[in-house]
Image (tube, helix red, strand yellow):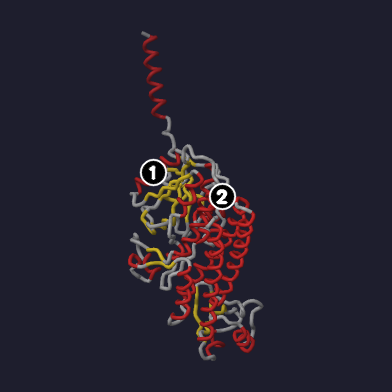
Amino acid sequence: MLRAHAGWVGLLCLVTHLHARPAPRLRNQIDGIPVVASSEAWAGKTLAYLHAALQPLGCDVSEAFLAGISGDAFVFTYLDAAVDEQQRDHWPLDVFAAAAAPLGYSVEWVTDLSVDEVKALVKREIDAGHPLITHSLDSRTHFFHIIAGYDLDKGVLLVQGVDRLFGGTEYEEIVIPDGWSGAVPGETFWARNPIGVVSRLADVPGIDRRHVARDALRRAIDLWEQPAFPFGDYWEEGDWARWASNLPLHEMQQPLGAAAYDAVERDVLNAEEITGGMIWRLDEQFVVRKYRHRDAAQFLREVAPAFSAEDGETLETVAARFEEAAKDGDAFYRMFWGHALTEDAAKTAMEARRRMDDAPNLVFGIPDELGDEIFAQWEGCRVMRHPWGRIVILDTPERRAHAAALARALKAHGEESVSLLRGVVAD
């Protein structure tokens, strides 16, 4: 009886111990996803996020190579309408999927899930070793984010993003929201709770760099020649549409490539006045253009050795032209945010006026030393507050004509580069 009693006591202790043991934490993460620098995020370097997400999956190509084969490095768009940030977050194709596929990877977008479904998806894919990409998950940044893990006990996602979202040595913990909206590359455009699942495909042969590069050059040519692409339907939340001035985006097309430069010229010549919104959209698109052109130059130099000596030399030439075009774009944009008054700040009205007359700009930043009243005395000058600081606008037909001529020169430069690429892929 004593032995039987001891057995029952032992079993009771075991059951009690099992019930007392805490349930396993619902937490997991994928290590090895590097930070995305703030400079890359603000420059609109879309493929920086895919490049980071692919690191733990074994991908060793450069970010510029991803930008090149996806077409992202060759995208330039501009809509001459009161549409601001959506222009930056709008792509004519799914650049993530286009970059991943030739290298043996996949990016599959899933949208419009409930938050509970998102949690289940994140857990399943992270447990399988698949990073995820989303957009605008965290209100501090209007960019993509990489979901690197989860802690469902705490109700957070472990996120890699812009400089680890402003500091820290670990992945940032972002509280899982009730829902969010964000950009999705390609036809989807903007969606509710967008998630891109990044994974490695099975049984993929080694990459043929020349074949992949030739396909990329053909895509670059197509992107230059395609006149426009639709915004499509989009999911709104709150006052998001005000960034598009409540325009019916689903009925509109965004100019692309050569046609985008025509749209820039139209905006310069036909806008009733230079507004903060116009400056904003020019800045958004020309900053993105500069860094895409730099990626294009690096990509072309990386793949040039895979071609014949003659074609490789042509690609080196086009790479140099893309670098020049990035600088020319800066010169154009300075027409709408000139530094003639702020670099070695003008201190008197006479000095300010002389510098304004000597520069071709339509818009000048104003140094703190000069008050608004200085500019009010001059006909045609208009002082305006902007999120980036005070500006004075000197809008004349001659200055607009100069800006339009610069836009036409950018288009001509692009056509010359694309013409050289046509010769390479014609073989």
In front of the other: 346 or 278: 278
Of label 2 and label 1, which has the lower sequence position? 1
Disc 1, SS: helix
Quadrant where the C terminus lies?
Answer: bottom right
Disc 2, SS: helix
In front of the other: 38 or 255: 255
Left or right: 200, with 338 as reference point: left
Placement of 54 over or under 270, stated as above or below: above
Taking the spot 57% from the left edge, 78% from the top edge, the residue there is 365
Farthest residue toward the top? Answer: 1
Q: Are marks 2 and 1 in contact (CB under 8 Å)?
A: no
Q: Residues within 10 Å of mark 1 (few under 14, many from 20)?
A: some
Which quadrant holds residue 185? bottom left
**Three-letter code for the amino acid on which mark 1 is drawn:** Leu
The location of residue 336, given as percent across then percent down, is 53, 76
The location of residue 181, given as percent across then percent down, is 38, 57
The residue to which callout 2 is attached is 210
